[in-house]
Structure formats: C-alpha cells, structure tokens
Amino acid sequence: MLIAKVLQAGVRQSLLYGLILLSASCGSQGGNAVDVGPAGDVTAIQHVVFIIKENHSFDNYFGAFPVADGATSGLTSTGKTVPLVPMPDTYQAGLCNRWSCAIQAMDGGKMDKFDLISGSLGAYTQVVEADISNYWAYARQFVLADRYFTSVHGPSVPNFFYAIAAQSGGVIDDGGDPGPGTDCAGNSWGLYAVLDSAGNITYQAPCFDFQTLADSLQGASLTWKYYSDDGDGGVFNSIRHIRSSPDWQDHVASSAQFLADAQNGRLPAMSWLTPPSPWTEEAPKSVCEGENWTVQQLNALMQGPDWNSTVIFLTYDDFGGFYDHVPPPQLDAFGLGPRAPLLIISPFAKAGYISHTVYEHSSVLKFVETRFHLPVLTARDGAASDMLDSFDFTQQPQSPLIVQPRQCR
C-alpha cells in the first residue's frame, strides 16, 4: 500500500517536474582537449570533481548556519518540538537510513517521524560550527546549497548510482538482503532490493547494465576517473560493460592517487572521489577526522595548477537517518529523499552564496552535460537544474582558501 501511494505521488509530481527544475542548457562541445572559452562562459571550467561522503542531513551539519534554511529543533511523531542536541564527534546512536525508514520518517512531507526510525530521539542532533569549522569556512567563502536533496528515499548504493547515471536501475536499498549476490567484479555484497514500474520488489545480484555519465564522457573523448578505495572501483564495479571494459584500469584509482593528480595538474575532465572507510564521516566514525581528510584533498587541489579551472561539488550520499525539516519534492517513485549538505567550491562560485534552487545528485551530472554538451541520460538529469545559478563567470576568480586540519579530540 505504501509503495502504491509513492508511485501515485510520483506520477503526479512527474507532470510538474520539468516546470520545477528544468533549466536551459549552455556550454560548448567538449573534445579530446578541453578548451577554455571566453570570459564569462561556463567553459572556464575544465575539471569537475564530485566528492561524495556519507550519511548526514543538511540540518545535522548546517541547521544553524546563518541565512540558510536550517533548523535547530525538530518535530516528533507525538507532535512535540524537540531541540537538535549537540552531536558527539563519534556518534553511537542507532540510526536507520534504509528505503522504508526514509519513507516513514518523511511521513508524506510532514517530516515528523524520525523518532520512530532512530530509537527514540537519536536522529535529533546536530554539530555546531566548532565541530566542522572548515566546512563552515568553505560555506562562507563559496556556495552552500540548502535545497540539495538525495536522489532516492534510501541509503548509499542507490544514491551512488544516481551520482554516476541519474538512475539506480531500480535499486532502492543496499545489499545484505537474503541470498548471495556478487557485483560484476565478483565481490560479495548480498542481494539488492529492486523496485519495478508496477511497484513490485525483487532481489537481484548487484551487477547491472545501464548507461552512465562515464559512457557519455568517453563518447566525447573526454577523460574521467573514479578515485576510490572501496572495491577497486566503487559503484562502477556494479556496471557490467564498464567493469569488463579493456580500459577499466585507466579509469579507476585510489584516493591517494587523487592527491598526486591534483598536486601535479593531472586531473581528468570528470572525477568522482570517495574517501577510505575511516574518513567517510558515517556515524560512529569521527566527523573531525573525516573533515581533515577532505581538507587535505582540497588543499592539494587549491595549491595545484588545476585550481583556476576546477569546480568541486562536495556532498553526502544520503541523510544517514538524521533529522531534516524540509519536505523533499516527490518527483517519482524513487525520490527525492531528505536533504544532504552541498558545498560548491570553485574560483567561479558566487562568493558567500546560499543557493535555494532544488538540486539532487543528478544535477551534478546535468552541470557536466551542460558544460561539455553531452546528451542527457534519463528524465532525472534531463529535468534537473544545471546549477548555473551558483556561478558567476564574470567575477574576479576567487582565490584558494587554504585551511588547516583541526586537532581531533
């Protein structure tokens, strides 16, 4: 019954989707060499870096950020308003971010049942500026988006699929469901829950075959790389035609290699970057240590030769079970899910700007497609915002913001 209601809502919302999010495309044709266009043009961007960390909502990180649409209290299923209490650096509360938990917490847009998915009030917490002072510094100098929603009502894996393909192949939950299941590289993850157009759920091995942004980039002779220490290729291990490609090793690398490429001006046109497990920031891992890892990557890039032509999109794969007060637009049966933080860091990012435009993971793909004149992949990226409201290509380019790692408790 719940899935049927979600599907019905998706049909209604999809009729409005284009009106809500559709932006005009601009940019120039990409080629084997990425040329810089005239002043004031999006082609000033030659390198896109998409950093994806794990499991935090917007209110959990930026609920108290000035001017942004954040909250420092939240609603519960009993109708009470409770404060978002300070969150320890290594948070031990039991949180649920699975498909069913996200739908229950959102409660049809009321955003009032997070207490039912987290063991009482474990979801009603947030960090303060001192806990993520460097992230707040980036937000003050560059762009913070307070309408960046996760693509799926659920956890990491389906949202990672959207971050490379603007779809999940129907996947709505991570592995670990009944039965064995291996990805296209033979790594065991269990079976993934897959939702079809009729609302039926089946369980399938995590090896799929659908087009991704990587295919579009290769078709335009543009370079790309997935930097990850998770299964030697991260989510691309679950895309059969890419995992079996003879040039697979040309496109996957460790996160340590990202540092070297950033420092030495060897970044591809498109980079996906995920942290090693200790620094994802997923509870109960240290937020401070995770932020320090991010600072290390950004300092290397900002001090390298590619800074002047780069944009970094820094976000989180899903809400992690943490409270957020903004109802996500329901575009289709899969999402959108609760908000996650998004920082847009670039010499051409508007200074100190808060974007209130609806974004999702597919919007980053839309930006890349706009910049390099690539075809859209699905209805999601076709209708998503191109994110250009967050840029000013006529401004004096912003200088790097070099910050120091913090001393973690």
Image (cartoon, rainbow, N blue to C red):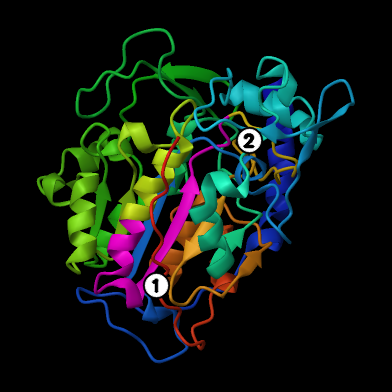
Numbered range of the magenta stretch: 297-320
The residue lying furthest to the bottom in this view is 38
Q: Is residue 244 left or right of residue 388?
A: left
| Nearest to viewer (mark 1 / mark 2) | 1
Decide whether residue 303 is among the magenta residues: yes
Q: Residue at x 20, y 23 (%)?
A: 186
Question: Up-down: is 299 above or below 109?
Answer: below
Quadrant of the drawing holding the N terminus: top right
Count residues near mark 1 (Cα–Cα under 10 Å), then give few for <14, some for 14-19, many for 20+. Answer: some
Residue at which label 2 appears: 333
Name which residue type carries label 2: Ala
Q: Are marks 1 and 2 in contact (CB under 8 Å)?
A: no
Badge 2 marks a residue whose secondary structure is loop
Count residues near mark 2 (Cα–Cα under 10 Å), then give few for <14, some for 14-19, many for 20+. Answer: many
Q: Position of residue 349 (x, y in %)?
A: 51, 73
Question: Up-down: is 326 above or below 387?
Answer: above
Q: Residue at x 17, y 67 (%)?
A: 264
> Taking the image as drawn, is residue 22 in sight?
yes
From the viewer's side, name the closer residue of 218 and 305: 305
Q: Position of residue 141 (x, y in %)?
A: 54, 69
Residue 19 location, quadrant: bottom right
Name which residue type carries label 1: Pro
Q: Is residue 264 left or right of residue 154?
A: left
Badge 1 marks a residue whose secondary structure is loop
Q: Position of residue 82 (x, y in %)?
A: 82, 30
Residue at which label 1 appears: 400
